[in-house]
Amino acid sequence: MILECLVAAMFFEARDQTPDAQMAVAEVILNRVEHEDFPNDVCGVVYEDRQFSFTHDGMSDDPETYTRHDDAEALEEIRVIAQDLLTDGGKGLGITSTHYHATYVRPFWVDVYDLDGRIGDHLFYTCDGNKRNC
């Protein structure tokens, strides 16, 4: 179940991104699992209320229902990355980020966190601990 939750998040949040960008999304989820302010398991983090847009967009949350060739190919690659991350303890890129968003949106919380950088079409952030408890 853990693998399926991580794969779903990676697929819906970054299936059209590079493997590094997909891995970065997964690492945010794994970083949240380790953070005291988030649920302590992958599925809890992924399906926490309104944290990831795919969980409340009204569309299927099952990557298997997306059968276009490019989706199937992305899903296969994402499964490998996710399994490797879970096997390695989530230390793929070694990022510390607990938040990210697509470059084309500006969430209300962006000024609370420190920008770590951009990978693909996502900006990644970590709380510095001084601006607010996160």
Image (cartoon, rainbow, N blue to C red):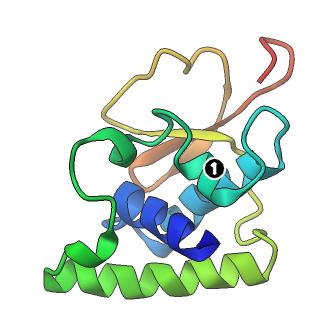
Residue at 33% across, 39% down:
56
Against 97, is 107 above or below?
above
Against 134, is 57 above or below?
below
Q: Secondary structure at mark 1?
A: helix
Residue at 34% across, 48% down:
54
Instruction: Give the percent coordinates (x, y) of residue 120.
Output: 43, 56
Against 89, is 51 above or below?
above
Instruction: Give the percent coordinates (x, y) of residue 103.
Output: 37, 38
Residue at 22% across, 74% down:
65
Instruction: Give the percent coordinates (x, y) of residue 22.
Output: 49, 66
Front residue (pair 21, 12): 12
Q: Is the N terminus in the top left, top right, bottom left or bottom right quadrant? A: bottom right
Relative placement, left or right, of 22 versus 1 is left
CA neighbours of label 1 inside 10 A, class few (<14), some (14 to 19), many (20+): some
Residue for badge 1: 44
Give the image quarter of residue 85: bottom right
Relative placement, left or right, of 76 versus 97 is left
Q: Amino acid at mark 1?
A: Gly
Instruction: Give the percent coordinates (x, y) of residue 49.
Output: 50, 34
Front residue (pair 53, 74): 53
Residue at 70% across, 44% down:
97
